Image (tube, coloured by chain):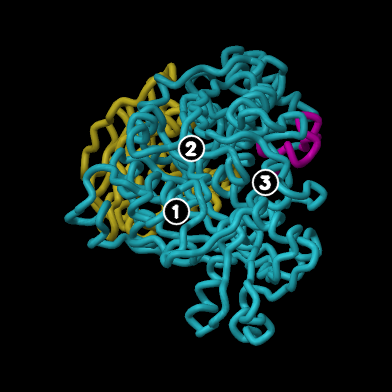
Amino acid sequence: MIRIGTQELEEIRAHGVRDYPYECCGLLLGRYSSDGKIVSETYPISNAREESAKRNRFLITPEELMRGERYAMRRDLEVVGFYHSHPDSPAVPSQYDLEHAWPTYSYIIVSTIADEAKDLFSWEQEPDRSRFNQEEIKCQ
Amino acid sequence: MPVTITIPAPLRQFAAGQSQFVVEAKTAGEALDQLTATHSSLRRHLFNDQNALRNFVNVYLNDEDIRHASGPATPVKDGDTIMIVPSIAGGAVIESEVSQSLPELSNEEILRYSRHLIMPEVGMQGQRRLKAASVLMIGTGGLGAPVGMYLAAAGVGRIGIVDFDVVEESNLQRQIIHGTKDLGRRKIESARDRLRDINPHIEIETHESRLTSQNAMRLFRNYDIVVDGTDNFPTRYLVNDACVLSGKPNVYGSIFRFEGQASVFWAEKGACYRCLYPEPPPPGLVPSCAEGGVLGVLPGIVGAIQANETIKIILGAQDLLINRLVLFDAWTMKFREFKLRKDPKCPVCGEQPTIKELIDYEEFCGMAAHQAPQPESKLEEITATELNARRLRGDPIQIVDVREPHEFEIARIPGTKLIPLGHVVSRMNEIDPEVETIVHCKGGVRSAKAIEALKRAGYQGKLINLKGGITAWSEDVDPRVPKY
């Protein structure tokens, strides 16, 4: 289960709409708890993929992630997951997502269609990396 | 020296749940060795079997990636922080489920396609898609040659080729799929051998026939994508309509002299060829390459663009040449691009289509697809053999050659007067109306036009067209005159 505030969810949706038709991406900062994760901040990141691939790819460079990690550490938070958008496609992980994901983290995907954010789901990878399971989002 | 190592959340389960360790080490590698000595299962997540850091793991010493320093040998100081940072990427991929059913690649194939595989835009999945894909090429001429060769080299799993011609000497200036040893062979056989030589891992299917309204739908059904490498309007409209009716993308290219065009006509996603050109030009208005010539390298460039777009369609790339027409001028070396729009009134892909099955395209284009257009009015003709006989008899005749001066330099019929087609009317007074005039060009088309133009302009003398032009003269009368 991932607990996240309405404000943070709104920020994710707004980022997705802002970057349409490209994919947006960012970090979810918060804490790990006994029953999942608590998100207390979103950390938008500029999609590092080249122009032509941005419509269906995102890449967070290790430098950016490291900066995000350090920022989180200073605030006594941790990276608990990532969010990204799927322009004009459903908010479900692709094969590409699966191949490039890590267990433990939460992956929030928001589907964007033109200037509107549609479905938003959170996903967690099976420890053996074989598939994604949908994760309950508890809005606070 | 004591250094701190931080572990990202996904790897903590392999490190007793801890997020930080303090170890004693002189280098970054030593620090990681220390860590993994106590937490052995962590090691396989950080290092591969060759003991190199895995691609999706980055190790930062303070703010620097150790790959950019001295790798594991990078020295550490007291109080340094080593951070293990995972790579994070992802994205929507349409048809993601397809991947399970894609064919596997053998080790040989992996080696062969390695330059593709290391690019994430292709990767294993993309290469497997190429292997699963099938493409039908119409024609193995100037355009079909590079298309076929690049698609075969790229590993497109099944390539169909349609052609009915044989390899002739004048093909070899541009049709690089065929060689001198193939002269006189059937093009599909010569092309098949060349493609097999380029890539033995793919299937080549040959269809020796003209593409017709009767066989097009049946042929297209078995392929994902159709590549149009034809050189005439009836076949071009046939390819377009059959692609629209069968829902296949039509990767279009055409060439003339120094100019080429390319686009992707895919009715489900954008304009089709008929949206761009609802009707063919009047017969004879646009000369063929045989009449007007073509720079040999031009189909190489345009065909390579077609191969490029075909591969992009297979890989699911964005930014295809859909609704875009690329015009290329090899002489000025300029590319231009025009936006195309789907025509809602298009008779084949519009909202209320009137063409729901294939029609007679030769009738539609007002000419036979594989022969020169016939002029409208009755034209008096003479064969090369008859002309020769008349000359030998000493008949009072004059011969006017309406080709261009550079063609005149290649080959000429002795005793002829050169007046290029564009000047026949303005230089009409140079043709004596009291004497019978034989008009000739390369194949008989331009001379027929010249005769019509002269008649329209009021020329009173008798004009006779040389059937088959200087080509027929070379074949039937004087083989010393070179064919071109």
Please state, as top left, top right, bottom left or bottom right, where the N terminus of chain B lies in the image. top right
* Disc 3: host chain: B
* Disc 1: host chain: B
**B63 in the magenta segment:** yes
Q: Secondary structure at mark 1?
A: helix
Marks 1/2 same chain: yes
- Regarding residue A50, the answer to whether it shows in the image is yes
> Label 2 belongs to which residue?
B315
Q: Nearer the viewer, mark 2 or mark 3?
A: 2
> Label 3 belongs to which residue?
B63
Residue range in magenta is B59-77
Q: Residue at x 62, y 34 (%)?
A: B166
Q: Nearer the viewer, residue A50 or A140?
A: A50
The extreme left residue here reads B352
- Chain shown yellow: that is A
Q: Could you tell me residue B145's position as x and y percent?
A: 63, 39
Q: Quadrant of residue B248?
A: top left
**Mark found first going from the N terminus, 2 or 3:** 3
Q: Nearer the viewer, mark 1 or mark 3?
A: 1
Please say if the residues under marks 2 and 3 sit with CB atoms less than 8 Å apart: no
> Label 1 belongs to which residue?
B233
